[in-house]
Image (cartoon, grey):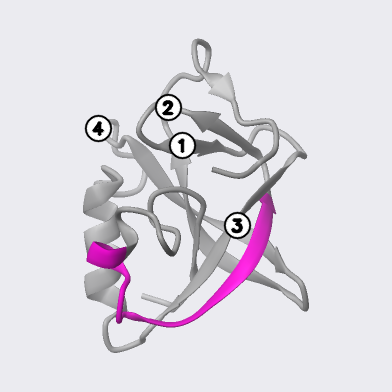
Amino acid sequence: MDYKPIFVYGTLKCGERNFNYFLKNKVDNIILAEVRGSLYNLGAFPGYVDDSQDIVYGELMFINKEKYIDVLNGIDCLEGFYGSKNSLNMYNRKSVSVKTKDSECSAWIYVWGGNTNNVSKITNGSW
């Protein structure tokens, strides 16, 4: 599998509840970043949807290459991602263009696979 950083926007961000378990001591660099799309409040966690030109703010996680596969597999499990186009997925992992202060790159993001009709949009783009 080709290496890509992971863009996180919710409970995996530094200081949030899932960072310590899945990413602490496994990340070589963390950079503030943004993507185009929408963020929805799903209760205990947010959901990203690539349905608009709004800005979603988060962090670009550069995973230690020796730990990359294990970290990605762990986050796939957390996000309920069972493989591309699997109907059981809660989130889908997708490659997107991510902007940082100094550059742009391709990164993985987890896209909410559920309905957003009865949930509120996070209008400021930040969880």
Residue under numbered circle 1: 46
Residue drawn at point x = 30 percent, y = 55 percent = 18
Q: Distance between the residues labelled 4 and 1?
A: 19 Å
Kind of residue indicated by mark 4:
Leu
Residue under numbered circle 3: 96
Q: Distance between the residues labelled 2 and 3?
A: 22 Å
Quadrant where the C terminus sits is top right
**Nearer the N terminus, badge 1 or badge 3?**
1
Q: Do labels 2 and 3 touch, CB within 8 Å? A: no
Q: What element carries label 4?
A: loop
35, above or below 66, in the image: above
Neighbor class of circle 2 (other Cα within 10 Å; few <14, some 14-19, many 20+) is some
Neighbor class of circle 1 (other Cα within 10 Å; few <14, some 14-19, many 20+) is some
**Nearer the N terminus, badge 4 or badge 3?**
4
Q: Is mark 2 on a helix, strand or loop?
A: loop
> Is residue 33 part of the magenta span, yes or no?
yes
**Badge number at residue 88:** 4
Q: In this view, does 93 lie to the left or right of 32?
A: left
Q: Give the range drawn in magenta.
A: 20-35
Q: Distance between the residues labelled 1 and 2?
A: 5 Å
Q: How far apart are marks 4 and 3 (CA)?
A: 22 Å
Kind of residue indicated by mark 1:
Pro
Kind of residue indicated by mark 3:
Val
